[in-house]
Image: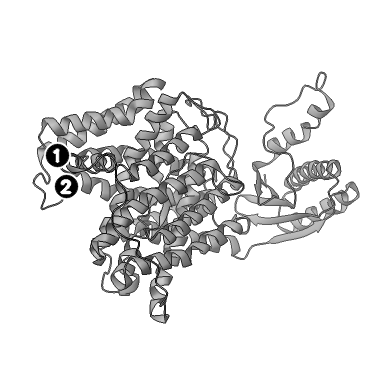
Amino acid sequence: MEENSKTNSLTYDVNERPPLWIIAVVALQHIMIMYNEVILFPVIIGKAGGAPVDHIRYACFAAAVVAGVATLIQVLRLGPVGSGYVIFMGSSTVYLACSTEAVKLGGFALMASLTLLTAPVQLIMAYFLRHLRHIITSTVGGVVILLIVLTLLPVSLHEWVGTKDAPHYGSFQSFCTGFITLISFIYLSLFGNRQLKIWAPVISMALGMLSAHFFGIFYLTHTRTAPWFGLPQGSWPGLATNLSWNHFPLFAAFVLATIVNTMMSIGNAMAVQPISHRNFKKIDYARVQGCLYADGIGNILSGLAGTTPNETYSENIPVVKLTGVASRAVGVGGAVALILFAFCPKVGALIVDMPGAVEGGFLVGILAMMIHSGLGLIITSGLNHHTGILVGTSLCLGIMAETKDFFPTVLPLALKTLFNNAVAVGGLNALILSTIFHFMPKPRLRFGVKPVVSQLRPSLKRIAEWAGNQDFSSRGVDRLQLACEEVFMHISHEFQRKDIASQVVFGLSREEEGIIVEIKGREKIEDVDQTDKMPNLRQSSQAELATLGLYLLGKIANEVKHTIISGHTYISFTVCDD
């Protein structure tokens, strides 16, 4: 989706390369945020599922290596695979419930097999993303990000307060430690200069750990005994091959988790783009598609390695905005560090030993920044009655699900763990409502023509007759015809210049806010939504004068968007009535 904004706070654009020390510092900050989750989730799943210790140890090592490799694929963008942005991959919270059930039923081997079998679901959704463009919108992506905040906020508060059997549960020391971490993070993000913001996560966590040491709640239990270097411990669990129909409910739960994970990845791929360019224009759906491909391949690697499924980490995206360093070199450095840390138990142990109050206070600050990203995506889609219903009901259902107390005896036991997750319940509601809103009965007009000038007049006549039948005013019809004419002539010129003979498809629908037009071509053409300055009619070149029509388009139509997905061009706009 389009968002005409400028990210002037960037110190290093996604395509720029900062000095090596900045790459190392910012990459370390990213890893400090997410490394604990990467290696902790296999432990939680393994212990809850009663897996052998050897398999748990191996799963922790494999999770770090797979996270590094998947992040490397995600950041580098190998052909169509990968987003090309600083998006980190790691063990997934979305699969936590169904993975635990799989380990209980058949160990890590069954979990690995189900991960492998459901990974193609994400790849298929990525391939057909252009057919889902009206359903998985930036509004849905923004809602998912807000739901992620709802899911992670209790986790961060739990880390801050501590567990009930811990020696410092709910203590004054823990409160002060988390509060100092949070306040220093917010202060630096608001008042720090560009250089200071680069160090903000490290400084806030360092202040938090110093506070924890002062209050006597910082223990280096694992760090003291862990070796600096070491080969992986444990053994590969293998893959389960004795699958039967008894495993189908669990497979369905993995598929549902994969759909939710896909929506999260779409939201993250949308959220990272505006903060990674100084002069951001609009969402690049090819990068969103690449993000999904990389995520799916990451899950294939997770299944083969016998460890937990992967996801894109939302909490790392605000760090890009805070530090002003969006360079993909940081992502590459962080990915390599993740792999190296798997062979360096001392570093991993230090991050594991980080007091929960420090991590909890810091995550609260990160989640506050994520709310801004989610709201930004929703606003770019435009606010109307349908958007309000979708956002409101999805958030309400997500909050109800997160309480885990909404009619707990009514839900089937097999689905209970999934429907206690805000992202699963609220995200699916957003997806269902978006589908209903798109396919609900409404006046429509759809036809295809060759992009030649001789087809212009009959096409405009057809559009005018249809719009007139929808009680559109004569002035509104004139504006609609003029907007369609400008886009058609632009496409016709581009197709003629490139010697393209494919059809152009017009699609019009009558909505509450006016008539929404989408014009589709099967080729990439020059953007129509980036002309915001009127050319000088006396001094401009012929090429610059050709943009006059596109400038007029932006004045007579609303929400002009030019999207390219899988090589197809979609130009949409809204014409309002008087």
Q: Is residue 483 left or right of residue 305?
A: right
Q: Residue at x 42, y 62 (%)?
A: 257
Residue linked to disc 1: 219
Q: Is residue 550 visible?
A: yes
For residue 22, what is the image quadrant? top left
| Residue count near mark 1 (Cα–Cα under 10 Å), binned few <14, some 14–19, many ≥20 | some
Q: Residue at x 28, y 42 (%)?
A: 348
Direction from residue 374 to residue 514 in the image, left or right: right
- Amino acid beneath label 2: Gly
Q: Residues within 10 Å of mark 2 (few under 14, many from 20)?
A: many
Identify the element where label 1 is drawn: loop
Choose top left, top right, bottom left or bottom right for residue 168: top left
Residue 202 drawn at (x, y percent)? 31, 30
Residue at horizontal 34 percent and vertical 26 percent from the top: 199
Image position of 139 with respect to 448: above or below: above
Mark 2 lies on residue: 162
- 3 to 114, vertically: above or below: above
Place of residue 425 in the rendered image (x, y in percent of width and height, measured from the top left): 39, 61
